[in-house]
Amino acid sequence: MAGASLAAIAAAAVPWTNAVDRLWPALLYAAAGSAVILGLAGIAALLMRRASAAARHEAWLLGFVGALLLPVLSATLPAWHVLPRPVSAWFVPRAAETTVAPVDPAPGP
């Protein structure tokens, strides 16, 4: 009886593992981005050491709001791909220099 319940649990877990396999890059990106945003908020709070507590609180608040909005906005907004820099017209890459071996004339009959 216990074997049947374990098989049912394993069969029910398959869709979850497929979802996790598809989502792990997005989750990793969100975690890394959130860590960067919170790190910048922490640096801003350290630089604002002599500022009022309300100003430091606002820096932390903006950091946490940015960390929470990062996964949502990255999923809903279109991706931004930076195109490679175009090659200027005056720059023409040199062809590979080739050396030609001397050819011996064919021996006569």
Image (spheres, grey):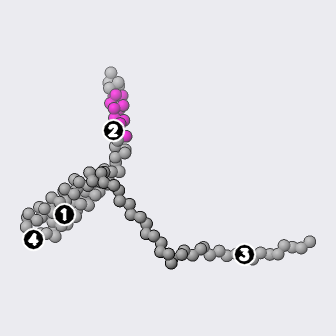
On the image, the x and y values in percent for residue 98 come to 65, 74
Residue at which label 4 appears: 50
Amino acid identity at mark 4: Arg
Query: Type of residue at label 3?
Result: Ala
Please tell me whether residue 107 is drawn above or below residue 59 in the rendered image. below
How far is disc 3 from disc 1 in space, using C-alphas?
66 Å
Residue 89, position in %: x, y? 50, 75
Nearer the N terminus, badge 4 or badge 1? 1
Q: What's under tag 1, amino acid-wise?
A: Gly
Q: Residue most toward the front?
A: 89
Which residue lies under the disc numbered 1? 42
Residue 12 appears in which quarter of the rendering? top left
N-terminal of the pair, mark 1 or mark 2, is 2
* Secondary element at image label 1: helix
Which residue is the site of mark 3? 101
Q: Which residue is mark 2?
A: 16
- Residue displayed at 18% across by 67% down: 44
Magenta stretch contains residue 102: no
- Is 70 drawn above or below residue 92 in the view shown? above
User: In terms of image quadrants, where is residue 92?
Assistant: bottom right
Q: Secondary structure at mark 2?
A: helix
